[in-house]
Structure formats: C-alpha cells, structure tokens
Image (spheres, rainbow, N blue to C red):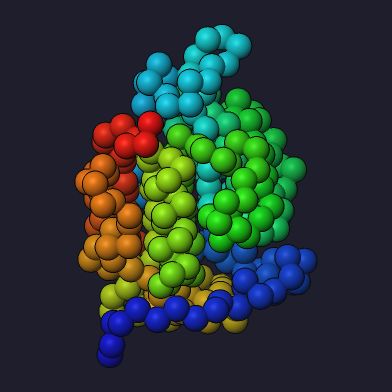
Amino acid sequence: MSLDRRVRAETLDALAPDDPRAQRSRRDLVRVHRAMGTRGIVERALRRVPPPPSSLSNGRVDAGGSGILDVLELGAGDGTLMLGVARRIAADWPPVRLSLLDRVDIVADATRAGFAALGWEVEVVTTDVLDWAAGGRSGQAASPDLIVTSLFLHHFQGAALDALLGAVAARTRRFVACEPRRDRFALAGSHLVALLGANAVTREDAVLSVHAGFRDVEIGASWPDPHGAWEMCERRAGAFGHLFEARRCVPDLDA
C-alpha cells in the first residue's frame, strides 16, 4: 500500500451547512476528535505557547492594563473544539481575543456564550482561507499573536499549501497545527469510524483525511524560512495525529 500523499475533496466540504448529512457529520467529528485525542494534543501544545502579557507583540492592553492575546483559528468550524481547549487553559492565559475563521458561520449561540463565560472576546470571520492568505483581512484576524488549526491543513497541497503557510508565517509569531497522521495504523483506524456511529459522509471523509495527512517533516518542508528565523517542531501526536509547531525566534527582518 502506498503512503504517498493524496488530497481529494471531502464530501462534508461540499454540503450546505443545513444539510442533515452535514449536521450529522459535524456531530460525528466530536467523537472522532475524542478518539484522536485532538483536544488534549492542542491543549498541551498551547500551554507551551503564550508569552508573558508584557511581551505580547501587538502591544494591546485591556482595561486593567494586562496584555491581550490575539488568537486566530483557521478552519474553525463550529468552534466547539477550541471552546473545549479554552476551558482547560483560560485560567492560565492572559485575556484573549479569538477570531474563528471559516467559509460559513456555524458557531452556535451556546458556543459564543461559552467563550464569553471564560472572558474571551470572540469574532467569527466568514471568508475562504485562501482569500485571507491572499491579503483579505478582517478585524483582529489581520495579525494575530498566535494562529491555530486542527484537521485543516490536509485539505491543501502544492501552491495552495505554500501560499497558506506563507501567509501564516508573515502574519504571526506562533503557529500550532494538529493534522491527521498518514500511516498504516491511522489508515486502519479511519476504516473503523463506523464503530463510533459515524454516518456515510464521515466514514468516507475519514479515509480521505488520512490519505491527505502528513508524516515526517512534510509541513516544515513547505514552511517559508529562508533566514532561519523560526524554531520548528514536527512529530507524531498520539495514535492518529501529527503536530507541527513554529515559533519566530528572531525579530522580523523587515522591522
């Protein structure tokens, strides 16, 4: 069996948000994330991320004089994964302004209220991520301190992936991505999501996601760093995940 990377369109992405199959598949994804341990992977990565409030690059402060961390999630979907992470880390973080970027706004009022209860200010940015990468900017998504994404980069390859990573590197100082891992064990697991009660859309997309996933240092190979300004770590994360972390370790050369 070949482990060459293959990216194909996934069914969920082509369905209208109110399509019952899409709604069911998004509920399935909660169980898939639980099986993959995605929330824990992202939580542990983010605990290594936030700087002391006084060193935030954006220089913004809240009414109490504390630094504010601007965070952007790419491909945020309904926002529930990030909410689960936020509930685990909020007590240890500075105040957060969170932008949830996706092509459609499917963030429920209850999810927004959950962020508000943590003291996180939330903005939903409705745009295609490649339009954002090409220079389309909206609100606090323009130059965040931190960009996060989960099970999203694997939708892109070639020039599109290069453009997306280039935009991320140009606009932030820290980046965390949790993706499907592409190996035989993960592929076998993807064929078993029916045991989680997943519908046909999720069962098909799970297999496609693994084929489009990452291994070794494939994300880092596409990361733009001609001057050695970034520290990067790329590794297996859990049984089915692949984690990429990047942190700018020298000042912007153009500053």
Residue positioned most to the bottom: 1
**Quadrant of the frame with the C terminus:** top left
Left or right: 30 as drawn, with respect to 239: right
Pick the residue in front: 77 or 200. Answer: 77
**Quadrant of the frame with the N terminus:** bottom left
Left or right: 34 as drawn, with respect to 101: left
Pick the residue in front: 156 or 80. Answer: 156
Give how far across and how far down residue 91 sits, in percent: 47, 25
At horizontal 54% and vertical 17% (from top left) the residue drawn is 61
Q: How many marks?
A: 0
- Residue 202 sits in quarter: bottom right
Residue positioned most to the right: 18
- Residue 128 sits in quarter: bottom right
Pick the residue in front: 177 or 201. Answer: 177
Give how far across and how far down residue 138 sits, in percent: 65, 43
At horizontal 38% and vertical 40% (from top left) the residue drawn is 174
Residue positioned most to the front: 254
Give how far across and how far down residue 250 sits, in percent: 26, 34
At horizontal 50% and vertical 37% (from top left) the residue drawn is 144
Q: Is residue 212 above or below residue 89?
A: below
Q: Is residue 215 above or below residue 79?
A: below
Give how far across and how far down residue 4 sits, in percent: 30, 82
At horizontal 66% and vertical 75% (from top left) the residue drawn is 14
Pick the residue in front: 117 or 127. Answer: 127
Question: Do we see residue 233 in this rendering?
Answer: yes
Question: Do we see residue 48 in this rendering?
Answer: no
- Residue 159 sits in quarter: bottom left
